Amino acid sequence: MIVEFVDLKRQYATINKEVSKAISNVLSRQTFVLGNVLEKFESSFASYLGISYVVGVDNGTDGLNLALEALGIGKGDEVITPVNSFISTTFCITNAGATPVFVDVDPDTHQLNINQVKKKISKKTRAILPVHLYGAACDIESLVKICKKHRIFLVEDACQAQGSSYKRKKLGTFGVAGVFSFYPGKNLGAYGNGGAIVTKSKSLYMKLLKLRNFGQQKRYYHDSVGHNSKLDDIQAAVLSVKLRHLDDWNKKRNKLAEIYKKMLKDLKFPKILKDSKSNFHLLIIECKHRSKLQAYLLKKGIKAQIHYPVPIHLQKCYKRLGYKKGDFPVAEKLASTILSLPIYPELRKKEVEYIAREVNNFYGT
Ligand SMILES: Cc1ncc(COP(=O)(O)O)c(C=O)c1O
């Protein structure tokens, strides 16, 4: 049996009629950039999240870049962020000219370690940039308190967390800004690149609208230096269709995660915070003999991946920051022991059972 890590073709087969209709609507309008279809998606995503404003941008990385720029974060500023994430969580800080101040992660949840965050706050700290890793909530309630106390910004990297929540409030809506990615493999994925910044602040929203569109409000009158980073209408049309299915798809992922947990009793899974709901963007196990297990699974047709094999402080691109092995031991250990098993709404129960059985076979349990 072959089990892909993600099989988007299966999902497409379930929505192809809806998607074709939505795309053909854009084609008949011939408004591809900043059109009504984008506006409609922004407003549906805002109501879905329960937030005032959504700004569609070209991708999640741009979303993070634009959010920090709009908040005026730059040279001389420090931003606290975890080392266990996709690289863009830190790229935006260095792209802004600011300094990333890294923290390790919690060994149980794999999310940023709050005690270390508290210790790393300095006079230069302007923001905390946590990630809701794997689509599960980090300790966002504590972060809100810390940011309020120190009067610093909270910008959430919610790129993996479409539809996840903490105490029934959607992730991405706790800070001054939240950023989503609509990369195709995400729980809410476009058919190309896509991203969004969400906020409850009208002034930030107004700044972001300009920033994504060449720094102009009136065409060809550029009040500030800006970017060209918009979610295009065809992607917005696809996302509007998919948004209608998101909760159902996330429920299916949760059910599959339960089967994995039931069948892989001897393995450690990252803990999900009480009162929170993960969208299970990724299904992570901690395992011994990781490379051998991954190779064994591949032989059995099961494609597993690693998120992420190198913590950010040890990436070549950040050598200049001077961090070394041993600085963040929890993230470093996880990088060599975690494995992501296939999980997506269209994955069949019997496929999950097959994967879990093969993992157990490998360990002889
Ligand atoms: C945690 C995290 N941050 C940022 C990004 C960047 O998003 P994008 O690929 O849309 O630029 C991603 C997606 O890959 C992500 O997983």
Image (cartoon, grey):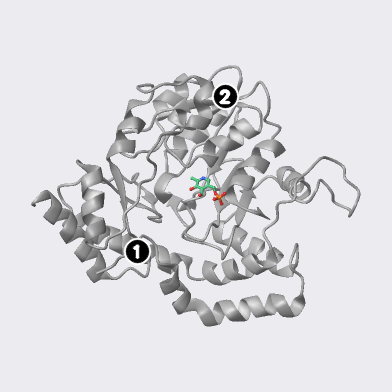
In this view, the residue in front, 363 or 145, is: 363
**Label ID, residue 307:** none
Q: Position of residue 44 (x, y in %)?
A: 61, 65
Q: Quadrant of the N terminus?
A: bottom left
Disc 1, SS: loop
| Front residue of this view, candidates 7 and 40 | 7
Q: Relative to residue 172, is residue 268 drawn left or right?
A: left
Is 354 left, or right, of 346 in this rendering? Answer: left
* Res 39 quadrant in image: bottom right
Q: From the viewer's perspective, is residue 79 above or below residue 30?
A: above
Residue located at (49% from left, 77% from top): 15
Helix, strand or loop at label 2? It is: helix
Q: Say what amino acid the circle numbered 2 marks.
A: His
Give the amino acid at mark 1: Glu
Residue extending farthest to the right is 221
The dot on residue 150 is 2
Specify the farthest residue to the top.
Answer: 123
Q: Residues within 10 Å of mark 1 (few under 14, many from 20)?
A: some
- From this viewpoint, is residue 117 visible? yes
| Residue positioned 78% across, 48% down in the render | 210
Residue extending farthest to the left is 364
Marks 2 and 1, Cα distance to the nearest angstrom?
A: 46 Å
**Left/right of residue 70 with respect to residue 145 in the rendered view:** right
In the picture of the structure, the residue carrying the numbered disc 1 is 4
Viewer-proximal residue among 182 and 7: 7
Look at the image and tell me whether residue 136 can be seen.
no
